[in-house]
Image (tube, rainbow, N blue to C red):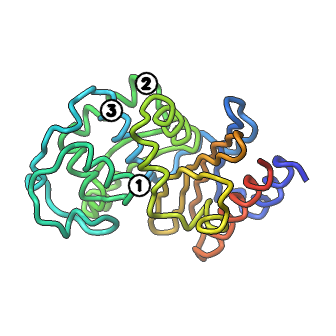
């Protein structure tokens, strides 16, 4: 079974709930609803990261995080006592630990306007930052962060290509229970760089699989699975299919 056939079989029962975009090196090899907008969850952090790195600021610059209200959810910054942190550490926490508080500090540092202007200027037409992470009041008013599989994969690939400092953050991602699920801690012949997103009835993952010099990049976005285990199992099977195709 080839990769395309296998992917079509896996997503066939869930076509209203899934979006996929996949590249083999620089060739688009599979896409389905890749421009459909989904609630971004933590994938919006890719846009924040790309905007920050494009500023060419000194990443050792210190930021006082106390000016941004603490939020819960993923991340450890809310539990730590130092009030000043270098930008590079905040970005690392935002990606490797999916830290929501660190993300909000960076959003405040850059401004929502500047991030959206950067996204617009670089033609990320399916991506929009409308609120801070974990801002339930803003969400109640209909303000939602949005992204597409196409945009999320393009952001990820651009970051991996142009900013080598991000490689360690994605490779050491703490949330590995989706596309890398069946390989993490067991398969030593593959390196997987990834960034997840999750929320109510939302599970996303964007990843790079590297095995024997071959590279496959993929974004899988899902919404509307009432049984989250089904969505995670689907992603794990997609990751396993990619692994065996390399």
Residue 25 drawn at (x, y percent): 68, 33
Residue sitting nearer the eye, 154 or 160: 160
Circles 3 and 1 in contact, beta carbons < 8 Å: no
Q: In percent of the image, x 67 and y 70: which residue is there?
A: 233
CA separation, marks 1 and 2? 20 Å
Above or below — where is 229 with respect to 132?
below
Res 50 seen here: yes
- Residue occupied by mark 1: 42
> Does residue 14 appear left or right of residue 162 in this picture?
right
Q: In terms of secondary structure, where does tag 1 sit?
A: helix
Nearer-N-terminus badge (1/2): 1
Circle 1 crowding by C-alpha within 10 Å: few under 14, some 14–19, many from 20: many
> Does residue 5 appear left or right of residue 79 in this picture?
right
Circle 3 crowding by C-alpha within 10 Å: few under 14, some 14–19, many from 20: some
Residue sitting nearer the eye, 36 or 89: 89
Q: Mark 3 vs mark 1: give the one in front.
A: 3
Q: Quadrant of residue 49?
A: top left
Residue 65 drawn at (x, y percent): 13, 53
Q: In terms of secondary structure, where does tag 2 sit?
A: loop
Residue 124 drawn at (x, y percent): 47, 31
Residue 130 drawn at (x, y percent): 32, 46
Nearer-N-terminus badge (3/1): 1
Res 231 seen here: no
Q: Mark on residue 53?
A: 3
CA separation, marks 3 and 1? 18 Å
- Residue occupied by mark 2: 122
Q: In percent of the image, x 8 and y 52: which residue is there?
A: 67
Nearer-N-terminus badge (2/3): 3
Q: Mark on residue 170?
A: none
Q: In terms of secondary structure, where does tag 3 sit?
A: helix
């Amino acid at each position: 079974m080839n990769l395309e056939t296998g992917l079509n079989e896996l997503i066939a029962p869930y076509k209203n709930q899934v979006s996929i975009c996949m590249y083999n090196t620089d060739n688009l090899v599979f896409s389905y609803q890749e421009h459909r907008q989904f609630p971004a969850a933590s994938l919006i952090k890719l846009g924040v990261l790309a905007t920050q790195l494009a500023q060419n600021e000194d990443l050792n610059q210190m930021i006082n995080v106390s000016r941004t209200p603490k939020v819960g959810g993923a991340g450890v910054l809310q539990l730590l006592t130092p009030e000043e942190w270098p930008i590079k550490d905040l970005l690392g926490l935002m990606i490797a630990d999916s830290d929501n508080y660190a993300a909000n500090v960076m959003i405040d540092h850059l401004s929502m306007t500047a991030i959206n202007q950067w996204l617009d200027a670089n033609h990320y037409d399916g991506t929009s930052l409308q609120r801070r992470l974990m801002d339930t009041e803003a969400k109640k008013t209909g303000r939602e962060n949005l992204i597409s599989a196409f945009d999320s994969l393009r952001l990820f690939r651009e970051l991996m290509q142009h900013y080598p400092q991000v490689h360690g953050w994605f490779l050491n991602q703490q949330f590995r229970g989706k596309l890398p699920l069946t390989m993490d801690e067991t398969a030593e012949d593959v390196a997987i760089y990834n960034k997840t997103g999750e929320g109510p009835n939302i599970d996303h993952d964007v990843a790079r699989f590297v095995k024997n010099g071959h590279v496959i990049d993929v974004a899988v976005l899902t919404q509307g699975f009432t049984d989250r285990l089904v969505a995670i199992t689907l992603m794990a099977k997609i990751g396993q299919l990619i692994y065996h195709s390399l």
